[in-house]
Amino acid sequence: ETSLPSIASFSQSLDNIMETNGFQLGSITELLGLPGSGKTQLCLQLCASVQIPKELGGLNAEALFIDTNTNFTISRFREILKATLLRCQSILGEPLQLTEDEALSKLHYVNAFGLEKFCAFMYRLPNFLGAHPNVKLIAIDSIAYPFKDGISTKQRTGLLFKQMAELQRMAVQHQIAVVLSNEMSTRVGLSTGAVVGSLGDAWAHRCNVRVLLSTPQIPQDPTERLALLLKSNVAPSTVARFKITEEGIRD
Ligand code: ATP
């Protein structure tokens, strides 16, 4: 087991392929995948996981969910949160200090639909983090969506890279895990090296860790997913099998 602080996904298999046995603080992790591959579900799980005690894979901390495509539903988050808290209780064998209502209030939800709203919030982000020092996870679901149309590739690149530099700076300064979802439009084989999301090639260099989520070609059951580590600081590329269940992300 590693001593580096990170956020557990609740799939041991997925956490195992990560350098820090979970989602790394001080780092930007990109979740790449087709619609339905599980990017949003994993973000929601991490928003619950970050709140739980350290000995159970959390950080006793708060989460910021920046929703750019209105994928978020509070009912689904509540479901994952409830299951996560219950599971912690059963491991500990005693009630958690954290109640469901408290945990709900520790998820800071921001609707950033549209490029203007997104940029406006990103501009406010340093202030937000100053006012909420216990935020240890920022999930942006999805990073590509605000830049989808109405902006030239050149403009997009300039704006996005400036925001990424700022995110990187804040991730390191405040020791926050930044998790970005990025949708792909076409299926790629897990063996292909050249996996490109909707933000192009140069983008990949801005992320410290990149994980490709997918559905197995012939799944045994519809909950099964694969995670392929495309880029990491040290860990070699590996595949993990995990599941998306009613309770959230599991093995
Ligand atoms: P998109 O690019 O469309 O946002 P995504 O990668 O974010 O896609 P998710 O929304 O994370 O995809 O995953 C959707 C999948 O999660 C569903 O197909 C389903 O398999 C699973 N899922 C969603 N809600 C539940 C639930 N309540 N119980 C079990 N599985 C669920």
Image (cartoon, rainbow, N blue to C red):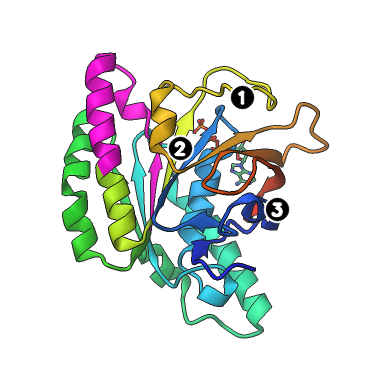
Is 144 inside the magenta-drawn segment?
A: yes
In the rendered image, the vertical position of residue 168 relative to residue 50, given as above or below: above
Q: Is the shortest distance between ligand 1 and the CB of mark 2 under 8 Å?
A: yes
Is 166 inside the magenta-drawn segment?
A: no
Give the Cα distance between marks 3 and 2.
20 Å
Q: What residue type is labelled 1?
A: Gly
Element class at badge 1:
loop
Q: Is the shortest distance between ligand 1 and the CB of mark 1 under 8 Å?
A: no
The residue at the point 55 percent across, 28 percent down is 35
Element class at badge 2:
strand
Q: How crowded is mark 3: few (under 14 residues within 10 Å), some or many (20 or more)?
A: some
The residue at the point 20 percent across, 57 percent down is 128
Label 1 vs label 2, nearer the camera: 1
Label 3 vs label 2, nearer the camera: 3
| Residue at the spot of label 3 | 13
Q: Which amino acid does label 3 sit on?
A: Ser
| Residue at the spot of label 1 | 193
Magenta span covers which residues?
Answer: 137-165
| Residue at the spot of label 2 | 181
Q: What residue type is labelled 2?
A: Ser
Q: In the image as oriented, which residue stretches furthest toward the front? A: 234
Name which of mark 3 and mark 1 comes first in the sequence.
3
Residue 97 image point, x, y percent: 48, 82
The residue at the point 61 percent across, 36 percent down is 213
Q: Is residue 150 visible?
A: no
- Horizontally, residue 221 falls left or right of residue 21, namely right
In the rendered image, the vertical position of residue 24 relative to residue 202, given as above or below: below
Residue 107 image point, x, y percent: 37, 59
